[in-house]
Image (cartoon, helix red, strand yellow):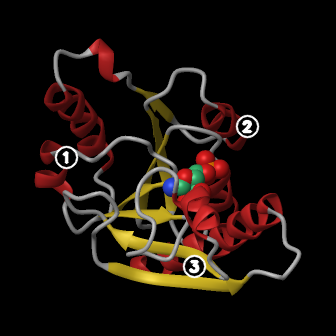
Amino acid sequence: MKKIVVLASGSGSNFEAIVKKLHGDSCEVALLVCDQPGAYCLKRAETLGIKTLQLTLKDFDSKVRYELEMIKHLKAVNPDLIVLAGYMKLIGETLLAEYEGKIINIHPALLPAFPGRNGVEDALTYGVKVMGVTVHYVDAGIDTGKIIDQESFKRAEDETASESKEKIHAIEHELYPRVIKHLLT
Ligand code: GRF
């Protein structure tokens, strides 16, 4: 069975959706790597029975050493795909040199519009009428890699920001597992 590793920093709702929809069926979610001690995604992994690795950048001399340590664990798994799901660090040259073409990310806006860490807020502030989600390959830039798939929706006249955010999450939880499954087959 194909193996994936998920990298996350926060809540991990996408991680959970991926595990529930794919693990043990379409692929094995072999490991969750988290860069934030105490992040909720680690609790989700425990409940879901997924192995975790917690690495903290400031415990290392440099980002290169941090990523080399991660690579050591990734090589033990030999994943077919590395899935970023709310991983809040730029992928550095070390990890990219090893796995470019096998790392994907999900972004809560219709790229190339609104890249960066506040994609949803930026789109709402701009006043867009159509919002959406992008899954893309990861390259050295910020949300600049080749687009794999996108899904959009039109905001209702009276839609609040939190309703839009909920819709975005709901789309992510369907789209990401579907794209991953497609890439693995
Ligand atoms: C998602 O909105 C994703 O698009 C972005 O980070 C968020 C992670 O949410 N990259 P969660 O931790 O999966 O709930």
Give whichever of 152, 74 is nearer the camera.
Answer: 152
Check disc 3 and report the residue beneath it: 178
Check disc 2 and report the residue beneath it: 47
Mark 2 is on which residue type? Answer: Thr
Coordinates of residue 125 in the picture (x, y in percent): 61, 62
| Mark 2 vs ligand 1: CB below 8 Å | no
Q: Quadrant of the C terminus?
A: bottom left
Q: Quadrant of residue 131?
A: bottom right
Return the disc, 3 or 1, that comes first in the chain's sequence: 1
Coordinates of residue 143 in the picture (x, y in percent): 34, 63
Separation of residues labelled 3 and 1 (CA atoms) = 25 Å
- Let me know if residue 185 appears in the view: no
Q: Is there a contact, CB below 8 Å, between mark 3 and mark 1?
A: no
Mark 1 is on which residue type? Answer: Leu
Coordinates of residue 50 in the picture (x, y in percent): 58, 42
Looking at the rendered structure, the secondary structure element under dot 3 is helix
Mark 3 is on which residue type? Answer: Arg
Name the residue furthest front. 126
Q: Quadrant of residue 17?
A: bottom right
Looking at the rendered structure, the secondary structure element under dot 2 is helix
Mark 1 nearby-residue class (10 Å; few <14, some 14–19, many ≥20): some
Q: Quadrant of the N terminus?
A: bottom left
Looking at the rendered structure, the secondary structure element under dot 1 is helix
Q: Residue at x 19, y 62 (%)?
A: 100
Check disc 1 and report the residue beneath it: 95
Return the disc, 1 or 2, that comes first in the chain's sequence: 2
Q: Residue at x 22, y 62 (%)?
A: 139
Give whichever of 52, 89 is nearer the camera.
Answer: 89
